[in-house]
Image (cartoon, rainbow, N blue to C red):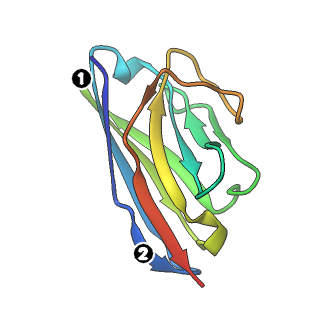
């Protein structure tokens, strides 16, 4: 059974940096693509970034390109995925969700199978 547990959210000021972590466990996560979505109050969930299981392919939403970086560290049964966020803006305020699926997707149309419970990021101006 796949489990995704996010951590690292918090309250920061505009211009600050923050790194989110996701601990993924399950029989196949070390071979599966992973990613991050976010949902701001009153909005739908939006794609943020995704990474292939080899980490050779990475995709980003236009709104975070150049500021966010996705990375992963693979172990036999536990996979860590990170979202390094720099130069945070108030519009980055959202609940951030770690996701995984059997294929690598990108964009809001990607519908990953597994989702974590999310971690709140609040950026004050």
Above or below 20: residue 75 = above
Q: In the depicted view, which residue is nearer to us: 95 or 69?
A: 95
Q: Report the residue at 52% width, 37% height from top.
A: 35
Above or below 17: residue 108 = above
Sequence-first disc among 2 and 1: 2
> Which quadrant of the view contains residue 19?
bottom left
| SS state under label 2 | strand
User: Foreground mark, 2 or 1?
Assistant: 2
Q: Position of residue 63 (x, y in %)?
A: 73, 56
Image mark for residue 11: 2
| SS state under label 1 | loop
Image mark for residue 51: none
Q: In the depicted view, which residue is nearer to us: 3 or 68?
A: 3
Q: Report the residue at 50% width, 25% height from top.
A: 33
Position of 27 with respect to 19 (left or right) is left
Q: Report the residue at 64% width, 63% height from top.
A: 67
| Number of other residues with Cα within 10 Å of mark 2, as a class: few under 14, some 14 to 19, many 20 or more | few
Q: In the depicted view, which residue is nearer to us: 40 or 69?
A: 40
Above or below 119: residue 74 = above
> Which quadrant of the view contains residue 103?
top right
Position of 82 with respect to 51 (left or right) is left
| Number of other residues with Cα within 10 Å of mark 1, as a class: few under 14, some 14 to 19, many 20 or more | few
Residue projecting furthest to the front: 42
The N terminus - image quarter: top left
Camera sees residue 23:
yes
Q: Position of residue 110 (x, y in %)?
A: 65, 27
The C terminus - image quarter: bottom right
Image mark for residue 76: 1
Q: Position of residue 64 (x, y in %)?
A: 68, 57
Q: Report the residue at 39% width, 54% height from top.
A: 119
Residue projecting furthest to the right: 62
Q: Position of residue 40 (x, y in %)?
A: 59, 57
């Amino acid at each position: 059974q796949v489990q995704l547990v996010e951590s690292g959210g918090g309250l920061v000021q505009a211009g600050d940096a923050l790194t989110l972590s996701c601990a993924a466990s399950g029989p196949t996560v070390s071979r599966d693509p992973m990613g991050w979505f976010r949902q701001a109050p009153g909005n739908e969930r939006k794609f943020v970034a995704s990474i292939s299981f080899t980490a050779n392919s990475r995709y980003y939403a236009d709104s975070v390109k150049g500021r966010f970086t996705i990375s992963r560290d693979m172990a036999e049964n536990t996979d860590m995925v990170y979202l390094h966020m720099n130069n945070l803006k108030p519009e980055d305020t959202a609940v951030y969700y770690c996701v995984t699926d059997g294929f690598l997707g990108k964009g809001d149309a990607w519908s990953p199978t597994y989702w974590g419970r999310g971690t709140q990021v609040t950026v004050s101006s």
